[in-house]
Image (spheres, rainbow, N blue to C red):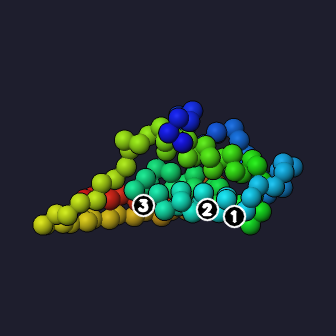
């Protein structure tokens, strides 16, 4: 992956992933290994967490298109190696967390089933 063509975004915004997309099946073992590694990486790269959750929906029966989407996330990570969170020792460590979860219907005035959430961390 050192010499790969890097991706500027972790996912193509126009690409819709479906369970039965008509492409041939990918290796489930290799796909699970890749998605598991990306999932582990979300601890220091929270900006890819949503995209990893999208591709992890297809662990049961991955196709070549799903594998390509997971590889794109990996190519994005390869191009942004200077991003991330550095965890270090601190004598007076203080972690403050604030979360907000609201129903989208309350925010938009429409009957929508989505839930909007936010998380703010202060280190």
Q: Are marks 1 and 3 in contact (CB under 8 Å)?
A: no
Q: In what element is the residue under mark 3?
A: loop
Report how far apart the C-alphas of labels 1 and 3 lie in the structure: 22 Å
Q: Is residue 9 left or right of residue 31?
A: left
Q: Which corner quadrant of the image does residue 14 belong to?
A: top right
**Relative to 83, residue 42 above or below:** below
Q: Is residue 113 visible?
A: no
Name the front one of labels 1 and 3: 1
Q: In what element is the residue under mark 2?
A: helix
Q: Quadrant of the C terminus?
A: bottom left
Image location of residue 108, percent across then percent down: 57, 51
First along the sequence among labels 3 and 2? 2
Q: Quadrant of the N terminus?
A: top right
Q: Are marks 1 and 2 in contact (CB under 8 Å)?
A: yes
The residue that mark 2 highlights is 33
Crowd class of label 3 (few under 14; some 14 to 19; many from 20; radius 10 Å):
few
**Relative to 22, residue 102 above or below:** below
Q: In what element is the residue under mark 1?
A: helix
Q: Is residue 99 left or right of residue 50?
A: left
Q: Which corner quadrant of the image does residue 13 belong to?
A: top right
The residue that mark 1 highlights is 29
Report how far apart the C-alphas of labels 3 and 2 lie in the structure: 17 Å
The answer to which of 11 and 5 lies nearer the viewer is: 5
The residue that mark 3 highlights is 43
Residue at the spot x=53%, y=57% of the render? 38
Name the front one of labels 3 and 2: 2
Residue at the spot x=57%, y=33% of the render? 5
Q: How many marks?
A: 3
Report how far apart the C-alphas of labels 1 and 2 lie in the structure: 6 Å
């Amino acid at each position: 992956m050192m010499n790969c063509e890097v991706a500027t975004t972790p996912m193509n915004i126009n690409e819709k992933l479906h369970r039965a997309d008509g492409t041939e099946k990918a290796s489930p073992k290799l796909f699970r290994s890749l998605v598991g590694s990306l999932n582990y990486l979300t601890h220091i790269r929270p900006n890819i967490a949503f995209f990893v959750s999208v591709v992890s929906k297809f662990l049961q029966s991955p196709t070549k298109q799903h594998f390509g989407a997971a590889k794109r996330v990996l190519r994005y990570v390869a191009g942004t190696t200077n991003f991330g969170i550095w965890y270090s020792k601190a004598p007076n460590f203080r972690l403050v967390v604030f979360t907000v979860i609201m129903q989208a219907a309350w925010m938009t005035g429409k009957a929508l089933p989505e839930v909007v959430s936010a998380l703010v961390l202060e280190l």
